[in-house]
Image (tube, grey):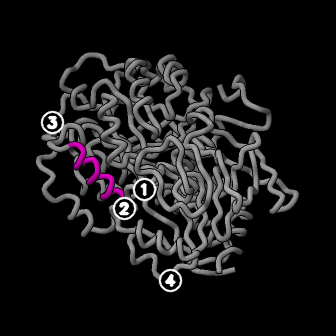
Amino acid sequence: MAGSDSPIPTGRRTGTDLVKRGLAEMLRGGVIMDVVTAEQAKVAEDAGAVAVMALERVPADIRRDGGVARMSDPALVEAIKAAVTIPVMAKARIGHFAEAQVLEALGVDYIDESEVLTPADEAYHIDKWRFTVPFVCGATNLGEALRRISEGAAMIRSKGEAGTGDVKEAVRHLRSIIGDIRRVTQADSAELYGWAKTLQAPVGLVQELAASGSLPVPLFCAGGIATPADAALVMQLGAEACFVGSGIFKSADPPRVARAIVEATTHFRDPAIVAKVSRGLGPAMRGEESSSVATRLADRGW
Amino acid sequence: MSGKIGVLALQGDVREHVSVLAELGAYPVEVRRPEDLAGIDGIVVPGGESTTMALLLESAGLRQPLADQLRGGMAAFGTCAGMILLARQVLDGRRDQTCFGVIDISVRRNAFGRQVDSFETDLDVPELGAEPVHGVFIRAPLVERAGPEVEVLAEVDGRPVACRQGPVLVTSFHPELSGDLRLHDLFLKGVG
């Protein structure tokens, strides 16, 4: 709760915008990996992940199993926290502020209010300003990104279509967000009011975007990244870091694939390095063409 | 002050350092490959994840040539993860943590706690005058031991958070995030 009840010396302020967005800045150029066990978390850390997302099931398995997907068991989150020194993130259902409170109490470093889990609220997202822990939220377009930022998200990730291993939705969402940022930057001051209406986003944030030319928080990419070249693609399109879910631990050789995606994310403009790390990785996750999936996770969020 | 300053650009908040250095009139270049080290007069090691950067330094073939340049007396400025990579010793770090060892300090990673404990505060830095420096501490490391050659420039709870040894400057916090240019300026003054 915005640092007011923390036992810290006076003069120190926790949970500020700068501190929340600052951690996202530190993750830039890195790969955040979904893990379901402490062992996988260690594999991720050894491969150079900048953070791990602690989950009970990766999105591909959530899709396969069906049913209601919820916050992970605190024991799992704690085991993963104990296994690694890098930041640990965990997912709460859209609108489920009580799950978020639990995750904050567990000391996770970032909460992903995620469409991969079954939404708890069909109208409202979590009021993220009320928390000390920072939040990341998914977005398919610029309006959605700005609405999440207005609710306090300190990082945006393009949603893609999680668990498919098909990068096309991630590309669509990134292109939509970044393309509209470019268009807003070209608008004159009167047109910005129109943009705010079109985007269904607060005019103040639209004006700030037009002035700065970028989102006020980092823009990462998620949902469907399965190969080093996928990572190089989304980074060149303007993503500042990658979330990789099913793509690593559903591949034939997770430690090597993890390492290769880390290197491709750093050297995304250097095709010789992307080629080198892509060689002989074995089968990537089989995946599922995103237009054929029964449940479109990216449609969740309001 | 001007000079060609490398910013290690494997991962982390590279852009902020590049922008502060440019604002101060230096000529920043991003360093990802060994050839990027050519002709630089100093190096900035940014904030980010030290474990990730250590691994990428090795795989990019940068660790050895950069270590050689640093040992030859090149100026360096490390913030947060950068401080860890420049330190002599990393306490309770991973086995692959110790990297360049060009400032005689022992650091503990994530010493202030987890992200919910990350904070901002004003710091007294006598070297930079009476105006306090605004420190942004994000999962910050702490200096547990500073050798006799090390000057402590600022402290939190009686523990060093900004140190200098010759041309090597390190901070637990992120001056590149707070808009205060004075520590970068101090680093540039140490560039030969």
Q: Residues within 10 Å of mark 4 (few under 14, many from 20)?
A: few
State the residue at coordinates (37%, 51%).
A174
Mark 1 → mark 4, Cα distance in angstroms: 23 Å
Mark 1 → mark 3, Cα distance in angstroms: 41 Å
Q: Nearer the viewer, residue A111 or A194?
A: A111
Chain assignment, label 3: A
Do badges 1 and 4 share one subunit?
Answer: yes
Q: Residue furthest front?
A: B148
Queried whether the magenta region covers residue A256, the answer comes back as yes
At label 3, the amino acid type is Ser
- Magenta stretch secondary structure, dominant: helix
Q: Which residue is mark 4?
A: B39
Q: Which residue is mark 1?
A: B54
Where residue A19 sits: x, y (%)?
Answer: 62, 42
At label 4, the amino acid type is Gly
Chain assignment, label 2: B
